[in-house]
Amino acid sequence: MNIIKPILFSAIAATVLTSCGGGAKVLSTPIENIDSIPLKVSPLTDTQKHTWGHLDLIQDTIPGMSVDKAYTEIIKNNEGKTVIVAVIDSGIDIEHEDLDGVIWTNEKEVPGNGIDDDKNGFVDDVHGWNFLGDTYNEQLEFVRILATGDETNPDYARAKTEYDEEYSKFFNYKTQYDQLLQQLKGADELISAKLNKSDYNLADIETIEAGDDEALSTAVAIGKYILGLGFEDVNAAKKDLNNGLESISERLNYNLNIKFQGRKTGDNPDDLTDIGYGNGNVMPVKDSESHGTHVAGIIAAERNNGLGVNGVANNVKIMSVRAVPNGDEYDKDIALAIRYAVDNGAQIINGSFGKYYSPHSDWVRDAIAYASENDVLFVNAAGNEGQDLDVKNCFPNDQIDNGPEVGDTFVTVGALEPKYGPEMVAGFSNYGKINVDVFSPGAKIYSTVPGSDKYDTKGGTSMAAPAVAGVAALIRSQYPKLSAAQVKQVLMDSGLPVTVDVIVGGDATNKAPFADLSKSKKMVNAYNALILASKLK
């Protein structure tokens, strides 16, 4: 389900290891404590909010990936070899103003002729493939297990327990959201009339003197409570609450509905040999299916075109592989999607999806091994439940029970917030010293979304993974002779080491060294990565 790490460069560090092109210096000494860098205490500007993942920790005191610095000081002339990045996701708005110039085209396929011109087994796969067909909503995997009625399934009891907990939780959420929206609606009518404007914030409400007007006094109390939950203004509260209610309703009506049948492809999802399903339409079914478009923009939105955002990487072509519905993905679709991407020239795959039940996890693991054997890097989102992946399995993964990895090109990414210090790890981000490799910007990320060339802010490890995929694309573009395994090692070895204690899983009482949350102990840095890559043969 759509869900939501080489060495520090700085004049303040002490030990110089060596110097390389352009006078950049590689430093071997990590930051020893949080006081080494001034904390960002002032609110981010609008520009910083939209670009923070590209900023530099030293220059901006924001834990970005030094992307802008990499272009300014290293890439400069913007040259490089074109890299194909496959985005296995919910589909991509390939007509978006900031993406239409970076979409992969299968030059061997004649559009719309109904013929498999390149004989790859997929008819009219001009920009990728859609393994979902017209499917949009889907159940979660543990709900599918219950829907079979097979109590002999070893996961059935666990699935039943989780289902009961999840359904009760989201039913209660729906009740709370309904009540909040109803209260806000009534309060908003009185407050907006009193203030004579409809775009007020908490500070505006606090100026109201209700006097003996009991109804207004109640409205003010409600307004203060709701906007005090952290909303910027009343319109933001309305938008977020309505979006939340829509998401909760979809969870109850589709994801957690045992009787719901969403798949419309006509194949048997439990038969890996039953192929030939889907179609070449890689666009989202509707605008709200925005996940894949947002991910694609993070990686490769057209740079410096005067439009909404800059992607991390230049010289990229995005291959759209639609395989992730509004619910849990099927293992079969993911396994075949990985193989499609590899067979059609992708050098990097971004997988911003995941789940905790995987009946055919071996199919996906075999596909991951296939990608590794064919020199393809797979960048994987860690997941958004604030869990330790070393003790709780999340799929896809490249090993069984923390055992040997099936390849050396699989990178799992945790998410950072735009604030250096104890709160820098996103509260939702999964972590794990064995099963998470690196961290990168993933909270409050501004990028492309479908529909009339729109943009929006989203958060999740789903946003952190494409940030790393973008840096990997930069490396493969500038240094095309490096293998996928070498690119992974560069990502891990070149990150910024962080030695401070951070809040884990969003629990302020649970702090741990940042170094304990991932294998590399680092956060990805594009500038460092390019310098280290230049030293490899």
Image (cartoon, helix red, strand yellow):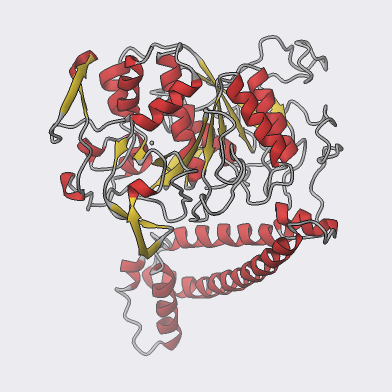
Is residue 338 visible to the viewer in this orientation of the structure? yes
In the image, what residue occupies the spot 44% across and 33% down? 468
Quadrant hosting residue 67? top left
> Is residue 187 depicted above or below 295 in this figure?
below
From the viewer's perspective, is residue 84 above or below residue 500?
above
Labels in figure, total: 0
Towards the viewer: 426 or 181? 426
| Residue 180, x across and y down, in percent | 53, 72
Q: Is residue 511 left or right of residue 350?
A: left
Residue sitting at the far front: 403
Closest to the observer: 356 or 320?
356
Relative image position of residue 190 (x, y in whole percent)? 46, 75
User: On the rendered structure, is 11 left or right of 509?
Assistant: left
Is 410 displayed left or right of 527 in the figure?
Answer: right
| Percent coordinates x, y for residue 505 in the rendering | 43, 58
Res 231 → quadrant: bottom left
Q: Residue furthest bottom?
A: 212
Residue 24 location in percent, x, y?
A: 20, 21
Instruction: Name the quadrant of the C terminus.
Output: top left
- Residue 417 visible? The answer is no
Q: Quadrant of residue 346?
A: top right
Near-viewer residue (287 or 530): 530
Residue drawn at 50 percent across, 21 percent down: 484
Query: Residue at point 37% right, 90% down?
Result: 212
Rendered residue at 48%/30% (across/down): 469
- Report the side of 102 relative to 198 (left or right): right
